[in-house]
Image (cartoon, helix red, strand yellow):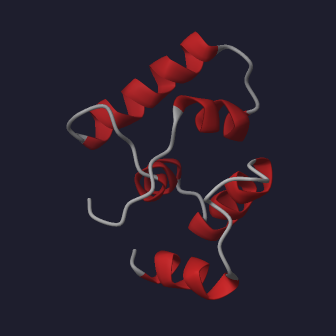
Amino acid sequence: MNNSIFLSVKDLMLLVGGNNIRSAQRMHRVIRDSLGTDKRKLTIKEYCKYEQLNFDEIWFALRESHPNSLLKTNRNETQKLSSKN
C-alpha cells in the first residue's frame, strides 16, 4: 500500500451525501471486509474499484471538498496516480 491515499469515514460521508457518521463507519467497514483488506484503512482506489467509479472523478470531488488540504495536486500528479491502477 505504498503511495496510497486513504479514504476517511468523513470523506465517505461527503461522497455519498450522508450526514450520519455511524452509517458511514458501517459502510467503510463493509467495503473493507468485502475487499478483504486488513487493518482499518481503505484507499481511494479500493473504494473506486468496489463501487465501480471513475478514480479521477472521485479524486477531483475529494480535492474540491478539501480546499486547504494536501490533496491539492497539479494535473500531472493526478494523472500519475490514476495510471497506477
- Eyeballing the image, is 65 above or below 45? above
Location of the C terminus by quadrant is bottom left
Which quarter of the figure has residue 14? top right
Location of the N terminus by quadrant is bottom left
Q: Of 83 and 10, which appears nearest the observer?
A: 10
Q: Residue at x 40, y 35 (%)?
A: 31
Number of numbered discs on residues: 0
Which quarter of the figure has residue 40? top left
Q: Which residue is drawn at 63% across and 70% down?
A: 56
Q: Residue at x 74, y 49 (%)?
A: 66
Q: Of 13 and 69, which appears nearest the observer?
A: 69
Q: Of 74 and 82, which appears nearest the observer?
A: 74
Q: Position of residue 73 (x, y in %)?
A: 65, 73
Q: Position of residue 37 (x, y in %)?
A: 24, 41
Q: Where is residue 15 in the image (x, y as percent from the top left)?
A: 69, 41
- In the picture, measured across the screen, residue 57 lies left or right of residue 7, that is right
